[in-house]
């Protein structure tokens, strides 16, 4: 399982006096969910959440490193103390909150269905009945399809967004569900114009929760307070909006 520690040189250069004010924080991300987090060809991890992590750590006056962790093991890795926090487009949900704590939301991202260009699928239950739908394993998107479509669709799980996209483009599934930003990136990058966004943004507070938060161990209350204060700061002064504008064409401000 890939765990690549990356020193965040971009915004995390802090003075020695700042280092003394807080211990180092290890932040896990998936490294495979563009534009939020992804691994570049040279092995460097990048994306909206990686850049935002740098800004948050500056506000907390703590040095940080980012480690990549496969999605399926990201909460277990936190619990076994491989790292101290998760920033991986993880929606705050009651189910996850049984195991871990969350910061206040730092981002809100709508979900979308994507289907082949010219497909009759429009996101409705009728158009999806009997179709195969792909979603990333253990995500709120997977649970959304389970809740709203049940046995009317054939739901298939994928370990990464790239594998999900590959099966959609090859026709092995009829539709995929993912975040609006990821879906938009897929369509923009598809020079063959073979896929399209379908339907409206998918909203369900019971499934998606109030937004995306930093995942933390429940006992780390001081770290949660530090993240909450840093998040409030980057939202208030527009730093979050400026970072997000580099990666997505819609507001993610909670």
Image: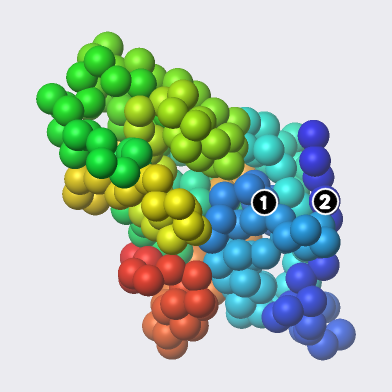
Classify 15 as above or below 243: below
Where residue 188 appears, as percent x and y from the top left, is: 43, 61
The residue at the point 65 percent across, 56 percent down is: 38
Between 211 and 1, the one nearer to me in the picture: 1
Label 1 sits on a secondary structure element that is loop
Where residue 249 appears, as percent x and y from the top left, is: 37, 71
Is there CB contact under 8 Å for labels 2 and 1? yes
Q: Circle 1 sits on which residue? A: 31
Label 2 sits on a secondary structure element that is loop
Q: Does label 2 or label 1 sit earlier along the sequence? A: 2
- Please give the label number shown on residue 130: none
Q: Residue 223: name its quadrant.
A: bottom right
Q: Circle 2 sits on which residue? A: 4
Q: Residue 16: name its quadrant.
A: bottom right
Q: Residue 62: name its quadrant.
A: bottom right
> Can residue 138 be seen in the rendering of this structure?
no
Answer left or right for 103 relative to 52. Answer: left
Between 148 and 27, the one nearer to me in the picture: 148
- Separation of marks 2 and 1 at Cα, in angstroms: 9 Å
> Can residue 81 be seen in the rendering of this structure?
yes
The residue at the point 76 percent across, 67 percent down is: 64
């Amino acid at each position: 399982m890939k765990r690549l520690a990356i020193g965040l040189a971009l915004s995390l250069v802090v003075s020695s006096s700042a280092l003394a004010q807080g211990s180092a924080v290890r932040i896990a991300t998936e490294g495979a969910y563009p534009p939020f987090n992804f691994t570049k060809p040279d092995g460097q991890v990048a994306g909206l959440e990686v850049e935002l992590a740098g800004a948050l750590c500056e506000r907390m006056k703590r040095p940080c490193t980012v480690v990549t962790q496969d999605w399926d093991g990201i909460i277990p890795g936190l619990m076994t103390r491989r790292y101290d926090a998760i920033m991986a487009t993880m929606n705050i949900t009651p189910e996850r909150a049984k195991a871990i704590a969350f910061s206040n939301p730092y981002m809100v991202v709508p979900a979308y269905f994507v289907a082949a260009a010219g497909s009759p699928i429009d996101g409705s239950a009728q158009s999806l009945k009997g179709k195969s739908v792909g979603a990333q394993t253990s995500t709120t998107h997977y649970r959304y399809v389970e809740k709203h479509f049940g046995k009317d669709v054939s739901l298939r799980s994928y370990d990464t967004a790239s594998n999900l996209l590959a099966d959609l483009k090859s026709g092995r599934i009829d539709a995929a569900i993912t975040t609006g930003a990821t879906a938009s990136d897929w369509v923009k990058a598809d020079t063959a114009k073979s896929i399209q966004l379908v339907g409206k943004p998918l909203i369900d507070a019971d499934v998606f929760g109030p937004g995306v938060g930093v995942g933390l161990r429940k006992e780390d209350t001081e770290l949660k307070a530090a993240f909450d204060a840093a998040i409030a700061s980057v939202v208030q002064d527009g730093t979050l909006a400026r970072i997000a504008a580099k990666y997505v064409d819609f507001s993610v401000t909670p």
